Image: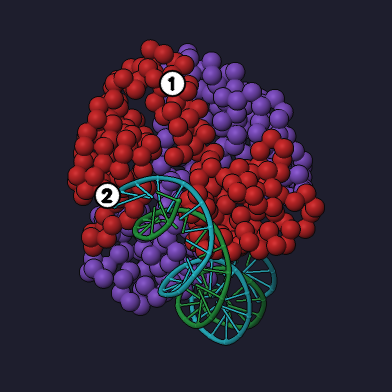
Chain colours: A purple, B red, C cyan, D green
Amino acid sequence: MIVKNWPPASVRAVGVERTLKAGEALFRLGSRSAGPYEVVSGKVRLVRVDSAGREAVLYVAMAGDALAESSLFSPNYHCDAIASTHSVVRLYPKGALLAEFRRNPQIAEAFMAMFAHQVMSLRTRLQLRDIRSARERIRDYLTLNVGADGRTVLLSGTLKELAAYLGLTHEALYRTLAEMASDREINRSGKKITLSTRRK
Amino acid sequence: MIVKNWPPASVRAVGVERTLKAGEALFRLGSRSAGPYEVVSGKVRLVRVDSAGREAVLYVAMAGDALAESSLFSPNYHCDAIASTHSVVRLYPKGALLAEFRRNPQIAEAFMAMFAHQVMSLRTRLQLRDIRSARERIRDYLTLNVGADGRTVLLSGTLKELAAYLGLTHEALYRTLAEMASDREINRSGKKITLSTRRK
DNA sequence: CGGCGTTTTGAGAGAGCTCAACATCGGTGG
DNA sequence: CCACCGATGTTGAGCTCTCTCAAAACGCCG
């Protein structure tokens, strides 16, 4: 979801698919790392378990997401990966990837660019979460995502998805959008939101 | 703060320092990108401004943080960078960096590894923010940061810093830690927190 | 037409935020 | 050596805002 076209075509070929039943482990903490994966379908969670048996979630990878990218540079995995539902994953063997990088610096650069973009977008998202007020948070999100005209935002997914992205309940999002509209701060028409140019 | 030893020694040499007064812009949206920066001292914020003049913060870089990493792969900057206080920054010209990558694939790999780790740690942090309850959030943080023995966490900074990292007010953090201690869920002694092995 | 997921609005409760006071600790200078 | 100072750490009380639970309207697809 974060980044599309993850593997360039030239490396996609080396991918190896594997099927997981719900609850099945893809790898465990400490096991030798084969390389990063891509979730083709289903849902895989990365977790760490403490000595009291409590499970803390690091990340939930959905269809299209990459997972364990940094296993490229590490001899073993540093957490457990467990399929939450019946899932299909694709392994990109790290040897093949690294060899490809050395052979073709362009590919390496493209990968680095992808990581750099992910870092930026994650930092931006985190910054958003530091804003307590729902209204401010939504306002900032809109400002950050305006199109070329500087005041129109085109929503890509559903509002529920946006709510999850923003870290709000969907109810809070609906309500706040409604308020902002009735205050003339924004204008809604379908999947398009336009910010009012008049300042507060 | 996120990652130390950012530039490998061999590229640190090419850095160029610059001083900024409070409020001074380092670069503007659309201006030609020279390369990524490191904040040596002070505080620089990356912001985007909408047509109504509202400023939304993408990221706040403190001393030691890198900023505009992805300018390496982009012809121009995609936001404004403004010094919040009197600051010193160091520019790493992108031409020099990219050349170094091609000359020395090891350096390129090290950079990629650093990005990959940042992505992981940011995703983990974001996942933490999805947990509403302060107590659960703290519990997860502790579980994710236990030392080799699987049940002891050594706090690196102040509790206030931890509160900011977790997205809680420091009061909420103090109180919840106190509660957890009185419930015998954790044990505190100075900068060390030990999780109780007994499960809930 | 019938079902399922999204969107929307209502009402209530609780968790964390805010404001405030005080304790504690480390450093600094007289 | 002690008084002072600032920052961190701690606890109290009240309040707001968002979450939670609920129900209904809407839109889409078979």
**SS of the residue under disc 2:** loop
At a point 27% along the width and 30% down the height, the residue shown is: B91
Front residue of this view, candidates A26 and A13: A26
Q: Position of residue B28 (x, y in %)?
A: 22, 43
Indicate the amino acid at tag 1: Ala
Horizontal side of A48 relative to B86 (left or right) equals right
Label 1 resides on the chain identified as: B
Measured Cα–Cα span from mark 2 to mark 1: 32 Å
Front residue of this view, candidates D11 and A72: D11
Residue topped by disc 1: B108
Front residue of this view, candidates A20 and D26: A20
At a point 36% along the width and 43% down the height, the residue shown is: B62
Horizontal side of B110 relative to B29 (left or right) equals right
Indicate the amino acid at tag 2: Ser
Q: Position of residue A183 (x, y in %)?
A: 33, 77
**SS of the residue under disc 1:** helix
At a point 49% along the width and 37% down the height, the residue shown is: B118
Label 2 vs 1, first from the N-terminus: 2
Label 2 resides on the chain identified as: B
At a point 42% along the width and 35% down the height, the residue shown is: A116
* Crowd rating for badge 2 (residues with CA inside 10 Å; few <14, some 14–19, many 20+): many
- Picture layout, residue A162 above or below residue B193: below
Horizontal side of B39 relative to A48 (left or right) equals left
* Residue D24 quadrant: bottom right
Q: Nearer the viewer, mark 2 or mark 1?
A: 2
Q: Position of residue B39 (x, y in %)?
A: 32, 37
* Residue A141 quadrant: bottom left
- Picture layout, residue B135 above or below residue A177: above
Residue topped by disc 2: B84
Q: Position of residue B137 (x, y in %)?
A: 61, 56
* Residue A176 quadrant: bottom left
- Picture layout, residue B98 above or below residue C9: above
